[in-house]
Amino acid sequence: MLQKAQVTTRFAPSPSGPLHVGHLLAALQARRLADAHGGRCLLRVEDIDQRAQHPEYLELMYEDLRWLNLHFDGEVMVQTQRFGVYEQTLETLRRMGVLYPCFCTRSEIKAQVAEMGRAPHATLGYLYPGTCRRLPADAVEEKLAAGLPHSWRLDMQRVQDLIGCPTWHDMRRGTQRCVPAAYGDVVLARKDFPASYHLSVVVDDAAQGVTHVTRGADLFDATHIHRALQGVLGLPVPLYCHHALLRDNAGKRLAKRDGARSIASLREAGFSPEQVLASLHEALQRGGVWWV
Ligand code: GLU
């Protein structure tokens, strides 16, 4: 049995477009799981990718949440205010010897993967084959001294040597085993992008004391990467629930580009919050999405 005060969930939208009904589903999953156990549901603004953010979407998000009468507990965490914390974590990983600079461009990586006869991973894209991991130390020094653009990658084989293959638990799919080296050496930072989603989400879930992560099934594979990072950083491991995604009539997953399903457009079309919630409920009944 879960103990009441133990449950902390979160809704963590990236305000790179208007909130849509898929976001509403994610928010409700988190809110209801917390409420079912007398716990807390926190709000975190995942605005780390500043190339994709627009301040007007953040304002609109707060307006939509108010209109929907969705409330969150405690203070809102905003990722762009936390670059210092992410940099400290990167430094910790550097000192542990599990982070290395990578000078490959996107098209070079694509070509390397194709040459190895591999297809891109279904949800994680081109898994980096570790080319720069094998660079001699003096070549690395030379490239860094020359100011060549680079990213910082997590050496997953070394992570695996340190922590082995740990498990994590999905509330719908059961216990999962993470094999760190199977996911390629992921990027944790770049010059124009000081912390990746993988890094910030793991650091922030721990900082906010999140015990239960509810999010869309599209992030299921990413959770293996998050588990590896939690292992190497010695962070607590939340329980996960990856819920099914809303789809349109053609079976295609709803996405931000489907502006017609944005909360703002439904509001402007004259729907009430209750009607929007009822439609979502009906959609879930049709799609058999898991509820608390
Ligand atoms: N920020 C992500 C999104 O808007 C969600 C990340 C997560 O829940 O871990 O899709």
Image: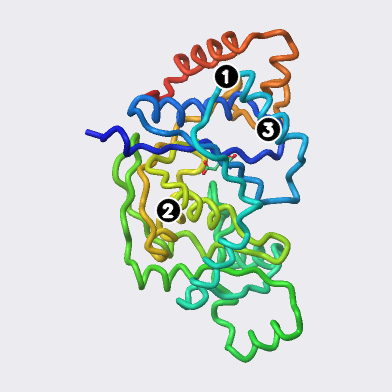
Asked whether mark 2 lies closer than 8 Å to ligand 1, one says: no
The residue located at (42%, 73%) in the rendering is 158
Mark in the foreground, 1 or 2 = 1
The residue located at (58%, 52%) in the rendering is 197
Q: Position of residue 73 (x, y in %)?
A: 49, 33
Q: The C terminus lies in which quarter of the figure?
A: top left
Q: Position of residue 91 (x, y in %)?
A: 54, 72
The residue carrying pointer 1 sits among few (fewer than 14), some (14 to 19) or many (20 or more) residues within 10 Å by Cα, namely few
Q: Would residue 141 appear left or right of 247 to someone viewing this image?
A: right
First in residue order: circle 3 vs circle 2:
2
The residue located at (50%, 43%) in the rendering is 219
Q: Coloring scheme of the render?
A: rainbow
Residue highlighted by disc 1: 69
Q: The N terminus lies in which quarter of the figure?
A: top left
**Residue 224: which disc?**
2
Q: Would residue 153 appear left or right of 176 to someone viewing this image?
A: right
Is residue 187 something one can see in this rendering?
no
The residue carrying pointer 3 sits among few (fewer than 14), some (14 to 19) or many (20 or more) residues within 10 Å by Cα, namely some
Give the secondary structure at mark 2. helix
Contact between labelled residues 2 and 3, with CB atoms less than 8 Å apart: no
Q: Position of residue 46 (x, y in %)?
A: 61, 45
Residue highlighted by disc 3: 256
Mark in the foreground, 1 or 3 = 1
Is 147 situated above or below 90?
A: below
Compute the Cα span from label 3 to label 2: 25 Å
Marks counted in the figure total 3
Give the secondary structure at mark 1. loop
User: Can you tell me which quadrant of the image ligand 1 is in?
Assistant: top right
Compute the Cα span from label 1 to label 2: 34 Å
Q: Position of residue 95 (x, y in %)?
A: 49, 78
Looking at this view, name the residue that lies furthest to the bottom: 138
Give the secondary structure at mark 3. loop
